[in-house]
Amino acid sequence: MKERVDKQQKEYMLREQLRAIREELGEDPAGSDADQFEAGVEQLQASDEVKEKIYKEIKRLRSVAGNSSEASVERNYIEMLLEMPWDKMSEDCLDIGRAEEILERDHYGLEKVKERILEFLAVRAYHPESHSSILCLVGPPGTGKTSIARSVAEALQKEYVRISLGGIRDEAEIRGHRKTYIGAMPGRIATAIRQAGVKNPVLLLDEIDKVSRDYRGDAYSALLEVLDSEQNRQFRDHYLELPIDLSEVLFIATANDTSNIPSPLLDRMDVIQITGYTANEKFHIAREHLAPKQARDHGMEDGGVEITDDAIRKLIASYTREVGVRNLERCLADLYRKSARKFVSGTAQPGSLRIDVPDLTEYLGKEKYDQEHVGQKPEIGIVRGLAWTSVGGVTLEIQVNTMPGKGELRLTGQMGDVMQESAQIAYSYVRSIAAEYGVAEDYFEKHNFHIHIPEGAVPKDGPSAGITMASAMASAVAGIPADHLTAMTGEINLRGRVLPIGGLKEKMLAANMAGMKKVLIPLENKKDLEEMNEEIIGDMKIVPVSDMKEVLAEVLARD
């Protein structure tokens, strides 16, 4: 006992002498920092393994010079370990009714998405120890993916942290740099957990499809461990050198397109598709969410400006053409900004300004988009097809002309490789059935064919224009007018079988806006109609078809 006491007194005297010497030299006494770190370890909620590691690093700090670069690195490392929430957790609010109210308050429409998220939360409420799969919200820009994640965090009363993954190409961005390198720092995952202050936040991995690869590493491979519930209990950051438990983190990823995400990573996520909004949904979003938000941002929440319902509908139809609502919000912001200028200049008084349809030209300039108009009567060789684009569905007028020649086929309108192949298939199919329409055997040797899709400055591609091209070509060859109020989408093979397509909701919406009365869709896509509301289909007659002969019977106005 006397030996132990003598040893402790000797160590104490030596430390005090070392402290006095460093103070005399004007150096920062590492001992004072080390004492503070030791006090922090005693209050830290962490396992014995973590505390033992920190004590070891503090001991190392005491042995190095206070102003050396090694001491600075050691000090930063210990501070990082002390700031990590190793075993600190927040308590979740698992009231599903409250979560439903928040989702309904913040988002109009998206019924399938909200239902899926509520089911996800219900599982966590029923079995808190379960670790559900990672949610991945996939949809076009401006459809509310990021705001849904924020609403989920609010509903659960969790800390919310967003990580933007766009452009990340280095594995060290995810796993961190090793401590031995100059300028080393922890990865984005560890930094986000530190920022949240608890080990169970909502962590949004934004733009997960924008991660890139190069010779320095593959960030997607590092994400495989992060997003695997079987592995992320022991996630090791290269900088921290200690396992971090990520199993309590609620990961939500967002993406515009899943084709860029490697299949092993996509397999670890539960994909929820978010489609675009109809014109009516956009109107309600603008009236209930966007306009009040812009009014608050511009100091006009007390009714400084009145924007009529007709003006908002005109704004949607003629000034924005997108799947999401970002451009719609920008247009509303323009109206409020220009109104503020009128108030400041004295040309109008707050509360007296009313913006209606005729005023939009003054505020926003001429209309950017014309409403699509259908033909006035059936015409030979002209058929309307439906296409999906990144900003929603559109209708395409496919035109075919025949002229005396040597059987050549010409394609214009900036068609991609897939669409050019569809044109070749349509040409071969029509040639095989031409005799049924009384076409002479040598007709194709003595005539040239020209297929054109208007708006040649816009590139077009995709596997869904086959039946439209075949119908337009059959109409031109047989000399039978095609119904101008019928639109169609689908691909064909050489035998005339109609193949399924994607993006049906956007295409149906485009057909409705263009005033079509009948839409032909592949028979295998009939099940997709069950997920559409009546507003999208409207008064249109939907005809599922499985063979090209059924298509021609519907579209060609034969006597």
Image: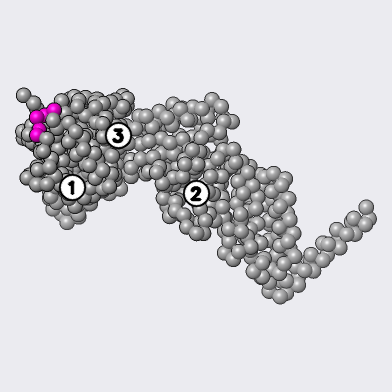
Q: Within 10 Å of the Cα at label 1, are there few (<14), some (14-19), or many (20+) other Cα atoms? A: some
The label number, if any, that marks residue 529 in the structure image: none
For the point 67% across and 47% down, the residue is 44
Please, is residue 120 above or below residue 341 in the view? above
The label number, if any, that marks residue 501 in the structure image: 3
- Tell which tag, 2 or 3, sits nearer the viewer: 3
**Which x, y percent locates residue 182?**
59, 66
Amino acid type at mark 1: Leu
Instruction: Please report whichever mark, 1 or 3, sits nearer to the chain's N-terminal start.
Output: 1
- Tell which tag, 2 or 1, sits nearer the viewer: 1
Mark 1 to mark 3: distance in Å?
A: 22 Å
Q: What secondary structure is found at the residue carrying circle 3?
A: loop
For the point 47% across and 57% down, the residue is 214
| Front-most of residues 122 and 407 | 407
- Circle 1 is placed at which residue position? 411
Locate the C terminus and report the quarter of the image it occupies.
top left
For the point 33% across and 42% down, the residue is 140
Q: What secondary structure is found at the residue carrying circle 1?
A: strand
Instruction: Please report whichever mark, 2 or 1, sits nearer to the chain's N-terminal start.
Output: 2
Inspect this view and state whether residue 228 appears: yes
Highlighted magenta segment, given as a residue range: 436-440
